[in-house]
Image (cartoon, rainbow, N blue to C red):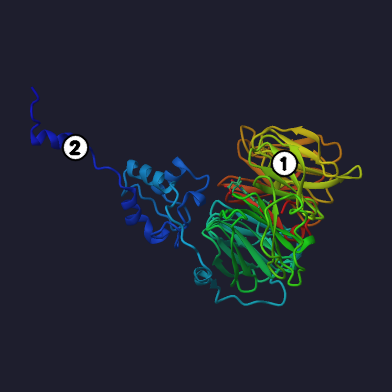
Amino acid sequence: MIRPIAFSSLLLLAPAALADPAQDYGEHCATCHGETRLGGSGPALIPETLGRMRGPDLEAVIAEGRGATQMEGFADRLTPEDIAALAGWLEQPLDTVPDWTEAEIAETREMNPDYVPTDAPVFGGDPMNITLVVETGDHHVSVLDGDSFDVLDRFETPFAVHGGPKFSPDGRFVFIMSRDGWVQKYDIWTLQEVGRARAGLNSRNIALSKDGRHLAVANYLPMTLTILATDDLSVERVVPVVSLGGETSRVSAVYQAPERNSFILALKDAPEIWEVMTDPDAPPIEEGDAEERGLIRRGPPEEGLFARRRIEIAEPLDDFFFTPDYRFLIGAARDGGRGVVVNLNVGREVAELPLPGMPHLGSGISWMRDGRRVMATPHLQEARLSVIDTQDWSVLRTIDTAGPGFFLRSHENSPYFWADVFFGPNKDAVHVIDKESLEIVRTLRPVPDATAAHVEFTRDGRHALLSIWEDEGAVIVYDAETLEEIRRLPMRKPSGKYNVWNKITFSEGTSH
Ligand code: DHE
């Protein structure tokens, strides 16, 4: 016989109140991070921005807050179960993404009312030998004098800067982008922020036109390329990214091609590469021999500023390495095992390279060796570097390393290139490799167990600066010839470093 359960027993059996992350978000997070999770005074809380900060990391920030920011801890108001549920909820993509129109971008533009331009730098050193250090630990940039290694300024950036900041051609201004789509303009001469605007909701990187007048922002959300005027960050164009087949696509990255006076776009979801002209007198676009090859007809030819050319390819490619003359690029195929060479002049694929283990071509660097131009690339999933002959597109050599790496760097005046070992147990190691013999000449381990990654040289190539990529980290300055340590500058999780001269002259030892 089934016995009815008494009302009091039912109460005892009732489960603890279930976590309601949407309600918790509305109550505790929305004021700073926006009702829509797309950001406000705090950053956007969407998976595209949170990136690698998953699971336990995210829960720890919700529970304990984030030092030196407005983010307080919620462990006194939310149970561990509520926090876990909230973190899981934040990792879900948004149901709908707003358009983020020109008008909406324009509304976010804030120019610094205290900014006063000067006729000369306010500091005494060489403005062309300034190196910027992005400190991701507390979202700041340090401005380093490249001769004295003094920190001239340390300014706050938008949350989660990614990719290289881009300098104006005269080296005076720098533009910095956050994954939240904010673009910040900073005047290196006055050491002051000029202003900022939110060009996208989730962005990848930025590129400056050859004349320094236009700034392109590659966006994942929405699927657009935003072009801002560099003088006042006003919107010049928002280009929806739609393939010939009518599909919308995210933009993986945008690159400046100075020799072509254009931007080159890698599209994440469409088998096309786009070239956007930054020359107001650009002639009508030649479409290469695509029609001969029986490919789909495109629209009427475009001309002038921001004219767009499509290069059709067999499958989407991203993470581009360019030859210094910008005739060829190598892109990574989606299967993570091949590099595809595209001739940008004729607009077609010309070669394929076996590059297993996810080559990181965007970090590739090139130099002359025995009269031939070679390039080297790390692999994100394999403990090796590939060295490629850019004349016949063969893999000349593979160099075994202590683990998979992220970045490579060299300088015209250095006989070596530096390769980090970002992933795995040897993340504290950095290889110094001879550009001629392709042998590892030294493996440095400056701080046992701490990630050592990303090198930048001073303008003359005499010093190499290495990041100890930890919250209580450092930038270590080495003599680039003797490999002796010269200085150790404490920094908060320093990531990339960017020397004004090396960047504006497109030093062959640096990536884009
Ligand atoms: Fe980057 C540059 C893409 C993850 C730090 N990264 C770039 C560029 C691209 C790119 C396309 C070149 C843009 C430029 O400089 O204009 N990065 C990607 C990814 O697709 C990937 C693998 C996944 C993602 O989350 O987007 C990725 N990148 C990372 C990281 O996890 C790193 C290590 C930490 C971080 O800050 O997010 C990271 N990426 C960097 C840095 C540069 C960069 C420091 C600039 C290197 C330079 O010397 O120019």
Tell whether 403 sits left or right of 11: right
Q: Which residue is mark 1?
A: 339
Residue in the picture at 42% in, 56% down = 37
Residue 76 percent location from the top left of the image: 32, 48
Residue in the picture at 67% in, 68% down = 214
Q: How many marks?
A: 2
Q: Quadrant of the C terminus?
A: bottom right
Label placed on residue 444: none
Front disc: 2 or 1: 1
Q: Which residue is mark 2?
A: 14
- When the figure is inspected, residue 386 is found, relative to residue 306, above or below; the finding is above
Q: Is mark 1 within 8 Å of ligand 1?
A: no
Q: Quadrant of the N terminus?
A: top left
Tell whether 137 sits left or right of 163: left
Q: CA distance from mark 2 to mark 1?
A: 58 Å
Give the structural element (helix, strand or loop) at label 2: loop
Residue 170 percent location from the top left of the image: 75, 68
Give the structural element (helix, strand or loop) at label 1: strand
Tell whether 354 sits left or right of 67: right
Snapshot quadrant of residue 289: bottom right
